[in-house]
Image: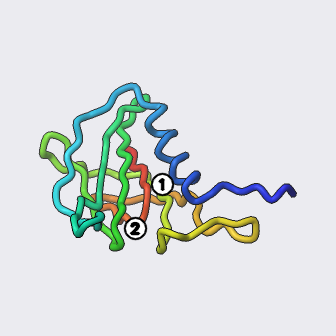
Amino acid sequence: DFGLYQSAQGTAYSLAATTINSASAVYRTDVQGGGTTPLPEGKTMPAVFAEAYRIGDKTVVALTNKGLRAETVSISIDRRPIRTRFHVVTVSARDPSAKNTTASELIAPIASLASDFISVPPYSVVRISW
């Protein structure tokens, strides 16, 4: 054992990069609603960012939540809600300073399924496909 492990940032980056680098198309994506997260000098920015991609025959959304509270998202295309089973992979931490170590891997991709609405934890990178 060489004491090697993937950092929390590396785990999140890997999920996003795999999605982005596998895409054959990028779709215009809008985020409506959601919370904000603080910036320096008392300013704020939207906590949730999303971008949609075409990967093979699937549509995939890469989404980040930089905020300290969970968000619930729904997905629409051309203003029509998507009603299907979503495959969701989440990399998240309750604390943005959480770290993986050789003794414990606190932050790892977790796969799940969702329908209609997707829960997005705080401080997370999420891949949603259908």
Identity of the amino acid at label 2? Pro
- The location of residue 56, given as percent across then percent down, is 43, 29
- Disc number for residue 89: 1
Question: In this rendering, which labeled residue sits more in front, label 1 or label 2?
Answer: 2
Q: Earlier in the sequence, mark 1 or mark 2?
A: 1
- The location of residue 18, given as percent across then percent down, is 51, 39
Helix, strand or loop at label 2? It is: loop
- The location of residue 129, given as percent across then percent down, is 39, 45
Q: Is residue 103 above or below residue 13?
A: below
Out of 109 and 43, give the one closest to the viewer.
43
Q: Is residue 118 left or right of residue 112?
A: left
Name the image quarter holding the C terminus: top left
Residue at the image point whose x is 85% and y is 55% from the top:
2
Residue at the image point whose x is 42% and y is 30% from the top:
23
Mark 1–mark 2 CB contact (< 8 Å): no
- The location of residue 9, given as percent across then percent down, is 54, 55
Neighbour class for label 2 at 10 Å: few (<14), some, many (≥20)?
A: many
Residue at the image point whose x is 48% and y is 73% from the top:
95
- Disc number for residue 129: none
Residue at the extreme left: 79
- Disc number for residue 121: 2
Out of 123 and 115, give the one closest to the viewer.
123
Cα distance in 3D space between marks 1 and 2:
12 Å
Q: Is residue 126 above or below residue 123?
A: above
Identity of the amino acid at label 1? Val
Residue at the extreme top: 24
Q: Is residue 108 left or right of residue 130?
A: right
Residue 35 makes an appearance in the image: no
Residue 114 makes an appearance in the image: yes
Out of 59 and 28, give the one closest to the viewer.
28
Residue at the image point whose x is 39% and y is 49% from the top:
128
